[in-house]
Image (spheres, rainbow, N blue to C red):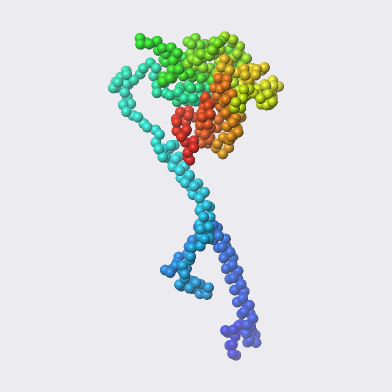
Amino acid sequence: MEVSGLAKGTFTLDDSSDERSVSSNYQSEMDVEASNYSLGTARLSIAHRLRSVLGMTSRRRKNGNGAEPAIKGDPQAPSARREPRRFRRTDVVRFATRALIAAPFVVLMLFGVLHIMHAVVGPTRLFWDVEVMDDFLPDWGMPGHVGEGLAKYPTDATRDVIPIRCHSHNDYWRHIPLFDALHWGCTGVEADVWLFDEELYVGHNLASLTPNRTFESLYVNPLVDLLEKMNPHTKFANISGHGVFDVDGSQTLVLLVDFKTNGNELFPVVSRQLEALRSKDYLSHWNGTQFNERAVTVVGTGNTPFDLVVAGTDYRDIFFDAPLDQMWESSGSVSMRDDDNDNDLGFALSELEAGVVSPGQGKVGTAGQSVDAFNTTNSYYASVSFTHSIGFVWRGHLSSKQMETIRGQIRGAHARGLKVRYWDTPSWPVSVRNHVWHVLMKEGADMLNVDDLHAASVDQWKARVHGWW
């Protein structure tokens, strides 16, 4: 028997080969390999395209002539000697596209690194040092040391403190109420008072009240003691009328009293407890003809009743916190109020009388009064919530409409001789806070309502308002 089908095909029972069987199997194997190759090529193509868009494709190593290495057995492989690739316009477009896509990621990575370094190194010390520790003769003037008995003088309680136009919001939250604010130079402090059993307690809410934290213990008595030191009677001089700041004795300190309970019941008790300051002529007052500024100016807000403030016809030493949002006036206008505007004082009062709105700053006891009733004889501040009146600060900057509202309100308040104060100003992000502070001071606001006393007391925030950081 002749073995003739060994190279050409398989053997059958009659010793004949089946060439179709060999051809069919070979074709199947080729189809499978082609399918696998196509699938792998497709997968590689998708991944390659993604990496190409991001500029992350890996380049194959070139030979000495700059040509790609040839693959053995590949009939379509380029020749060993290949012309160098010429620079094309599409390369520029591809490079620009990759740069634009990669730029945001690079910027985010940079800020991430800076943020980490800022957190590790410490605030404001990454590029500069704003703190200078002066340890020169730290024990000078102390008993048993050089200069013993020379370090103190009668009015040194607030030595080196420069008064600034900042109001210590919720001052009773400070580590040392009143004195923390004075330490940073704030010319205004705030006390929330609650009346229980003829005593005034200080706190943000009922849960924070304690028997020993009273209006007298936290504010009235410390102010009396401090002003006694600032007005010494020695063989050299008998000082009177000096305020709480050593460097500026004429600067008054505004004590903002936020009436939390019923204003008609609170008012006489607050007035009675202020007698310790009143008897020594430390309180700013209106004497029936003019306003006389003294070391402390008391302003009532919250539920302070306006009708009781103006009840005294020849003497007043508790002044009102007037509604700033009702005082808007356009540039060059005479009237402070638009009678057709539903947001005027008359509309607000009608809502109050109808029980639509709750009592609050600038509303209690104002029934029947026009906005022109608020002036220096009965009011000191003109205040409003920044968020309620001006609105949210979009894109980090105040809009032209918001700026016009601020200017109109400040214009109207100053026309009445009142000092402008915006409360509920944004505190975060810091860049927005600084922008608002800068705008308010530039436009003529008289007091910054702040929580961060240290930030308000330094000048760096003015320089950083428009900085990239």
- Point out residue 154 in the picture as x, y percentages from the top left corner: 38, 16
Residue situated in front as seen by the camera: 304 or 347: 347
- Point out residue 441 in the picture as x, y percentages from the top left corner: 51, 28
Using the rendered image of the protein, determine whether residue 387 is visible from the camera's viewpoint: no
Residue situated in front as seen by the camera: 101 or 329: 329
- Point out residue 74 in the picture as x, y percentages from the top left corner: 52, 73
Rendered image quadrant of residue 418: top right
Furthest-right residue in this view: 354
Residue at image position (59%, 67%) is 38
Query: Is 235 situated left or right of 333 in this image?
Result: left
Furthest-front residue in this view: 332
Residue at image position (58%, 64%) is 42
Q: Relative to 23, say whether 312 is above or below.
A: above
Furthest-bottom residue in this view: 1
Residue at image position (52%, 34%) is 435
Residue situated in front as seen by the camera: 31 or 349: 349
Q: Relative to 178, say whether 53 is above or below.
A: below
- The N terminus, quarter of image: bottom right
Q: How many marks?
A: 0
- Point out residue 156 in the picture as x, y percentages from the top left corner: 39, 19
Query: Is 447 situated left or right of 117 in this image?
Result: right
Residue at image position (49%, 15%) is 294
Using the rendered image of the protein, determine whether residue 365 is visible from the camera's viewpoint: yes
Residue situated in front as seen by the camera: 342 or 58: 342
